Every structure is written in structure tokens, then in C-alpha cells.
Image (spheres, rainbow, N blue to C red):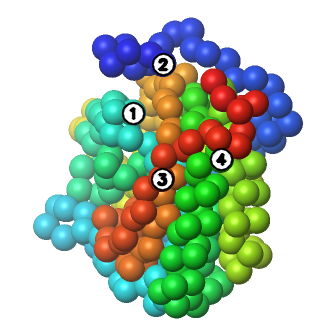
Amino acid sequence: MNNASDPFPSPHSEPPITAFSDQRSRLYDKMARDLEEHGPAFLKGGETSQSLSLSDLFELRNGAVTPILKAANPPVRANVLYLSPEFAKPISEVVKEIFLPYFDGVIWFQNTSIYHFSMFHASHHLTPVMATDSEIEDEVNAVKQVAEAICPLKIVLDRVVLTSTGVLLGCWQVISGTDPAEIRAKLRNALPRAPEKQLYDPVLLHTSFARLLGRPKLSSEETKKPFDQLGFFHELVARVNDKIRGFEATVSELWFVEEYDVLALALNGRMKTRRFHLGCSGDRNHST
């Protein structure tokens, strides 16, 4: 682990080459091409990765971005790995430093106290799975057992990408610990009633850093030149990558979250969280 005074080490630890890491690299390559292939749809009011319109999620009021909180009926039941503020804050500071001068008033930053990696849904908005209180408690206990078995992850930031829908994502690789694909498989086994179709690729390990909701504010110097929209966004993302690519972090908690508002984890909505430490009791061969 790097120390707090130097959170962006160089050179950084290289993740081992595995079938999962190779799949992740190809997936991240594809995600990085998304903006090039589809253009900045968020400037026209695009959709999120969960097929929800950005205009349904945020409003711009008095120069500030305000989330539009809507009750989730039924509540979404999400299992996420947690990234502590120790690691989230230095990342967020870099993102703000680079993006805020251009997007003040039209950018939503992920709350650094709830940076997370979506793993597996026991119920989501596309396929709601109704559950009684006792059934939810059974799910919680099953997830707790999964957490006790899997090992903490040491991870490295592979790259930052900006999607065509305006979401700035951190895409991570695993140095050691239980791979996300294996975690999802264990959660699938522990939660047999969960939707067959999940929201994300099994190998994906990503965090949302920010969401762009409008056009950049350019200086008078910049407005004198022809504006290369894609080039502008690529340059900002490259600057973020120059600063935080290779950032290392440790993940040691799995959360079971009931989101009472739509996208509560992303929008600071109402939620109930159960936090479990990763115990590594059943996965010793993955320990650091």
C-alpha cells in the first residue's frame, strides 16, 4: 500500500495477467471508445448506464446541480464493494481540480463517503424481485457468509474514461484478492432469486467519479479558436489519467444496500446499508 503522502506511486504494482484481467482490459478498451463512437450524448440529455435519462435524475437550479430523488418501488437491493474515503478523497480532489473550472454548476460529483463498485443485484428496477422482511434478512445473511469467505482486494486504477452519457468512470484492475467475477458468482449462488439478467459485465470493476450534465464554460481565449468537442473531452480525461492512473487502493468491505430512492448510492438518496468485512476464510489462495 502506498502511504498517504504519496497516493499516486510511480511505478505502480502491475496486476497479474489472468483471463479475468485480460477480459477487463478488452472491456475497458471498448468503454474508452464509447465517447468517440457515440459522441457526447449527455450534451443532448443522454441516458445513464442503467437506461435512466439524465434529465430525470438531476435539475440545474440557481447554478447548482440538484438530484431528483424518486422513490424506488420496490426498493433496489444492491451488493457493492466499498471504497473508503481514504482512497476516494484524493481521487475526487484531482477530478474536481481538472473538471470544475469548466463544468461548475453542470457537474455532479460522487459523494466520497459512498464510492462503490456495483457487484450484484438481488433486485433491480428492470426486474424487480419482491421480498418480505424475513426474505430480505435471509438475503443479508447469505451475503454476510459470502463476505466472510472472500478476500480483501488490492486494486490499481487502470484508466479513467468518460462515457458518451457523461459519466466519468474509474476502471480498475486487481493486483490480489478475490476477483470480481468470482465474487459475483458467489453472490449469484447465495441469492438464487436474483434477476438472471444483471446490470454489468461479470469482470467489471468500476466506480463513478462524476457526471457531466451540460456544456463546458470556456475562457474568452478558448472561444476564439474553433472548438473541437471530442478533442476537448479527450484532453481533460488524459489530464486526469496523467495524475491518477496507477493509483492503488484496498477494498475490504461488501455492502448489502436497500436503495429506497432510485440510484440512491449515486444521488445521496435514502438507503439502508449492512456492511460486512471481507474475512478471507474460504479463499486463502487469493490472500495477499
Q: Earlier in the sequence, mark 4 or mark 3?
A: 4
Alpha-carbon span between mark 4 and mark 3:
11 Å
230 vs 121: above or below? above
In the image as oriented, which residue stretches furthest toward the left? 62
Label 2 vs label 3: CA separation? 22 Å
Q: Residue at x 80, y 39 (%)?
A: 20
Name which residue type carries label 4.
Answer: Ala
Query: In the image, is 37 to the left or to the right of 97?
Result: right
- The residue wearing badge 4 is 149
Q: Is residue 171 visible?
A: no
Residue 237: x percent and y percent? 49, 35
What secondary structure is marked by label 1?
A: helix
Q: Is residue 278 left or right of residue 284?
A: left
Query: 78 above or below 161?
Result: below
Residue at the location (67% across, 18% down)? 14
**Which residue is more in the foreground, 103 or 180?**
180
